[in-house]
């Protein structure tokens, strides 16, 4: 492929285990606001730069995301974090007219996405709220978990409506732009594993994923699930419904890339670099890349900070991380080429 490989070509090649010049250099979740505030205080030249200019400043592959919100400005908001908006099927029916707006991308987004692909500098993706995430936003954290048992009709009604809307989103995206990948926002796991059982997943989530995922794949976008926490069991479940990749593989939650690669050689993974070592010095950062290198060489793994870069990380810390990131991204590709590991 040489040095002329475009960022979106590189991303897809890495996800599919193909030949490439280096692995992508992505900060997929960008940075905490407090992190950027700290860097801008110590390096005033960063102050006028927007997120994509910061990507260029750091030598990263740029990325552009659109989050399709199934709510509208008229949808009621919860009274507090995790509180319910609706509790019953009747209450859901009363707000349903405020949900599921027509999908729309701004002209600026479309222009920027096309420029990213034309210039070869960026990756373009979109997000849909998943069949665990979205019902939780309506039913509240506690009510959502009870609803699987206390009101399955309500849960299925919400998911069926979400599926119909998501079909429109996918069709619109496929007709409007060439998206490189998409994510389902789920956050279905925490540090002890999934918040629901496999039977609950099979009954309440899997039927809707099985209908939607093939439609997305037909548009050419790679399908991913974004779930924090320990996703070890969830990787198996989402693999069964056709999902192609997962992120961010949080190190502190016990995620294990080697296990996932052995169990799901056809899936790809993004993240897994422990954000908590970024402020611990060059030796610690290099040791973390050494930990990840075997997975990078096996392929279908794109390393990245396993969530947003935290405020304790200084500008100089981050430059050290990026220097080593590029070194290992190039090294992994070279080893794969030397050992002819491409699919």
Image: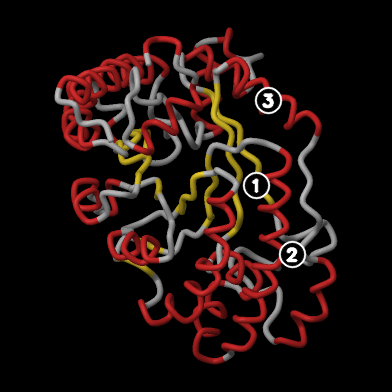
The CA distance from mark 1 to mark 3 is 18 Å
Quadrant assignment for the C terminus = top left
Q: Position of residue 142 (x, y in %)?
A: 53, 77
Question: As rendered, which of 85 and 121 lies closer to the eye?
Answer: 121
Q: Position of residue 97 (x, y in %)?
A: 84, 71
Q: Is residue 34 left or right of residue 86?
A: left
Q: Does 196 appear above or below 134?
A: below
Q: Secondary structure at mark 2?
A: loop
Q: Are marks 2 and 1 in contact (CB under 8 Å)?
A: no
Q: Secondary structure at mark 3?
A: helix
Q: Position of residue 312 (x, y in %)?
A: 39, 30
Asked which quadrant contains residue 3, the reply is top left
Q: Does 44 appear above or below 172?
A: above
Which residue carries the number 3 mark? Answer: 114
Q: Residue at coordinates 34% horizontally, 17% vertically from top-left?
A: 21
Q: Is residue 331 left or right of residue 92?
A: left
The CA distance from mark 2 to mark 3 is 34 Å
Q: Does 105 appear above or below 332?
A: below
Q: Alpha-carbon neighbours of circle 1 within 10 Å: few (<14), some, or many (≥20)? A: some
Q: Alpha-carbon neighbours of circle 2 within 10 Å: few (<14), some, or many (≥20)? A: some
User: Which tag is nearer the camera, tag 1 or tag 3?
Assistant: 3
């Amino acid at each position: 492929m040489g040095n002329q490989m475009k960022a979106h070509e590189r991303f897809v090649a890495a996800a599919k285990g193909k030949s490439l010049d280096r692995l992508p250099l992505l900060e997929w979740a960008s940075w905490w606001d407090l992190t950027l505030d700290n860097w801008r205080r110590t390096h005033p030249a960063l102050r006028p730069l927007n997120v994509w200019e910061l990507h260029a400043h750091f030598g990263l592959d740029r990325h552009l995301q659109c989050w399709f919100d199934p709510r509208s400005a008229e949808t009621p908001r919860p009274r507090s974090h995790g509180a319910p908006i609706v509790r019953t099927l009747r209450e859901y029916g009363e707000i349903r007219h405020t949900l599921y707006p027509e999908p729309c991308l701004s002209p600026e987004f479309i222009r920027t996405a096309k420029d990213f692909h034309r210039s070869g500098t960026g990756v373009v993706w979109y997000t849909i709220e998943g069949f665990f995430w979205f019902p939780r936003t309506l039913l509240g954290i506690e009510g959502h978990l009870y609803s699987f048992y206390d009101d399955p009709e309500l849960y299925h009604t919400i998911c069926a409506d979400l599926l119909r809307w998501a079909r429109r989103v996918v069709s619109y995206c496929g007709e409007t732009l060439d998206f490189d990948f998409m994510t389902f926002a789920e956050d279905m796991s925490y540090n002890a594993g999934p918040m629901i059982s496999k039977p609950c997943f099979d009954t309440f989530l899997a039927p809707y994923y099985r209908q939607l995922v093939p439609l997305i794949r037909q548009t050419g976008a790679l399908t991913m699930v974004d779930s924090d926490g320990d996703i070890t069991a969830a990787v198996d479940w989402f693999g069964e419904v056709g999902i192609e990749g997962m992120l961010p593989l949080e190190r502190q939650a016990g995620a294990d890339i080697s296990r996932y690669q052995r169990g799901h050689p056809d899936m790809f993974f993004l993240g897994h670099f422990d954000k908590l070592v970024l402020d611990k010095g060059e030796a610690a950062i290099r040791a973390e890349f050494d930990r990840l290198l075997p997975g990078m060489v096996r392929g279908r793994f794109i390393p990245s900070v396993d969530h947003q870069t935290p405020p304790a990380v200084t500008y100089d810390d981050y430059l050290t991380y990026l220097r080593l990131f590029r070194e290992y991204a190039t090294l992994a590709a070279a080893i794969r080429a030397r050992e002819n590991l491409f699919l």
